[in-house]
Image (cartoon, rainbow, N blue to C red):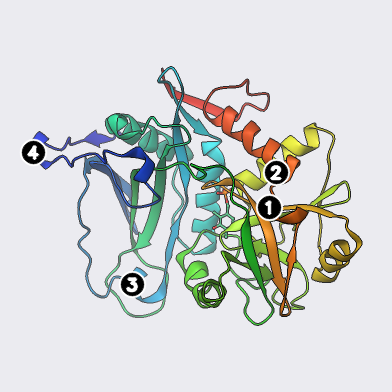
């Protein structure tokens, strides 16, 4: 399939954000987007890079009613010499197809997605910020567009990719977060869609997140839905605890999102000789480790922040400090290492970096 490109005329181009320290996340979008449609009997067709625009949807478009919607998220990084890099993009692309299958949506050829996002990034290359730690966020999304109210897999879909410049996550250095453990609400159940980046998972998480925010916490720590005992994820990130010399994260059993950053942390820490365990970790064990002084570090992992240190954890009415509320050395080392690989400042022993332009 040939990707057609319609460039935005100069008068339709937006002003780029001037101050890169105020980019934040998800506030600015570039001049172009990628779109491609699918229909039963016809498959994917009309791949197009076109000026960024509003979508026209029938009010009965199925995504608006039954949340047949998936997305993914990755970034493009500008190296010191101007080269552009993606970080393990095939992982995101494969994950998007895993999400598609679970939601009865059509898969997309992996090569087509990679070509689409690479081409789109290059068309909007001038939008990629230059400041330290800044990047271009890439959001591939698929929605069910068939106008129909009966509950069934849609017969029409739109796949689109939008991109936008985002700021450095830690412009003033690490700031450890405070997390709130909920035993009342859960995010995903075994047999459900917790392993997919599907809109419905996030809508279900808002209520507990709001309670946590109202109490002054950054994120919710989710426990397993059945026993409400085992640590699963934190907010929209994966969760790691360093207890003694063991780095522990929840196993991939269908209720947590298989994060690309999670996998990178596991491989990197393992290569440094850290004992990494993907196993169930009960809150009782976390509390015992805090009481016994063996809980050294805790952090969340995800594309947005790479790793985000956790300084305080609230459980059953009591707040506990982790690592004296400070960022631990392993957390910091993982952050620096992954960041330097992403921006081409270091060699890339795992072959994670994909250079898309010099
Ligand atoms: C996106 C996401 C993550 C992190 O995945 P990365 O690939 O590392 O960005 C973790 N948990 C949830 C629920 C997510 O949506």
User: N-terminal of the two: label 1 or label 4?
Assistant: 4
x then y, percent, for residue 120: 32, 36
Near mark 3 (Cα within 10 A), the count class, few <14, some 14-19 or many ≥20, is some
Left or right of 300, for residue 343: left
Q: Contact, CB < 8 Å: mark 1 with mark 2?
A: yes
State the SS at label 3. helix
State which mark lies toward you, 2 or 3.
2
Q: Is residue 142 left or right of residue 314?
A: left
Q: Position of residue 308 (x, y in %)?
A: 61, 50
- Label 1, label 2: how far apart the Cα atoms are: 7 Å
* Res 64 label: 3
Res 331 label: 2
Which marked residue is nearer to the observer: mark 3 or mark 4?
A: 4
Mark 2 or mark 3: which comes first in sequence?
3
Q: Earlier in the sequence, mark 3 or mark 1?
A: 3
| Along the line of sight, the residue nearer the viewer: 333 or 356 | 333
Q: Nearer the viewer, residue 317 or 238?
A: 317
Q: Does mark 4's beta carbon lie closer than 8 Å to ligand 1? A: no
Q: Which residue is mark 4?
A: 11
Q: Looking at the figure, which quarter contains the C terminus?
A: top left
Residue displayed at 26% across by 38% down = 18
Where residue 2 appears, as percent x and y from the top left, is: 29, 33
Query: Could you say whether the residue bearing mark 1 is in a helix, strand or loop?
Result: strand
- Mark 3, ligand 1, within 8 Å: the answer is no
**Label 4: how many residues lie within 10 Å, few (<14), some (14-19) or many (20+)?**
few
Mark 2 falls on what kind of element?
helix
Which residue matches tag 1? Answer: 299
Is disc 4 placed on a helix, strand or loop? helix
Q: Is residue 320 above or below residue 185?
A: above
């Amino acid at each position: 399939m040939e990707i057609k490109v319609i460039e935005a005329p100069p008068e339709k181009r937006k002003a780029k954000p001037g101050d890169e320290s105020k980019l934040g996340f998800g506030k600015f979008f570039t001049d172009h987007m990628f779109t491609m449609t699918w229909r039963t009997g016809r498959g994917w067709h009309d791949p197009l890079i076109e000026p960024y625009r509003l979508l026209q949807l029938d009010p009965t478009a199925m995504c608006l009613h039954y949340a047949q919607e998936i997305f993914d998220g990755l970034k493009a990084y500008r190296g010191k010499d101007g080269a552009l890099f993606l970080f393990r993009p095939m992982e995101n692309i494969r994950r998007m197809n895993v999400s598609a299958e679970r939601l009865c949506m059509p898969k997309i050829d992996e090569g087509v997605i990679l070509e689409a996002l690479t081409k789109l990034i290059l068309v909007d290359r001038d939008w990629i910020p230059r400041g330290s730690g800044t990047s271009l966020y890439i959001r591939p999304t698929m929605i069910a567009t068939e106008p129909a109210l009966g509950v069934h897999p849609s017969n029409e879909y739109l796949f689109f990719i939008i991109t936008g410049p985002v700021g450095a996550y830690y412009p003033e250095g690490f700031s450890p977060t405070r997390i709130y453990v909920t035993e009342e609400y859960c995010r995903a159940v075994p047999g459900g869609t917790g392993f997919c980046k599907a809109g419905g998972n996030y809508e279900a998480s808002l209520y507990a997140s709001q309670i946590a925010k109202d109490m002054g916490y950054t994120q919710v720590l989710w426990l397993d839905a059945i026993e409400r005992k085992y640590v699963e994820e934190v907010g929209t990130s994966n969760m790691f605890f360093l207890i003694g010399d063991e780095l522990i994260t929840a196993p991939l059993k269908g209720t947590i999102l298989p994060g690309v950053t999670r996998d990178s942390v596991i491989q990197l820490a393992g290569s440094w000789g850290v004992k990494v365990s993907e196993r169930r970790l009960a809150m009782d064990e976390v509390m015992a480790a805090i009481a016994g002084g063996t809980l050294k570090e805790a952090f969340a992992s995800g594309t947005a922040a790479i790793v985000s240190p956790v300084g305080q954890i609230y459980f059953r009415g009591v707040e506990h400090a982790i690592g004296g509320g400070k960022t631990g050395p392993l957390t910091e080392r993982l952050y620096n290492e992954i960041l330097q690989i992403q921006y081409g400042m270091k060699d890339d022993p795992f072959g994670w970096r994909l250079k898309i332009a010099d």
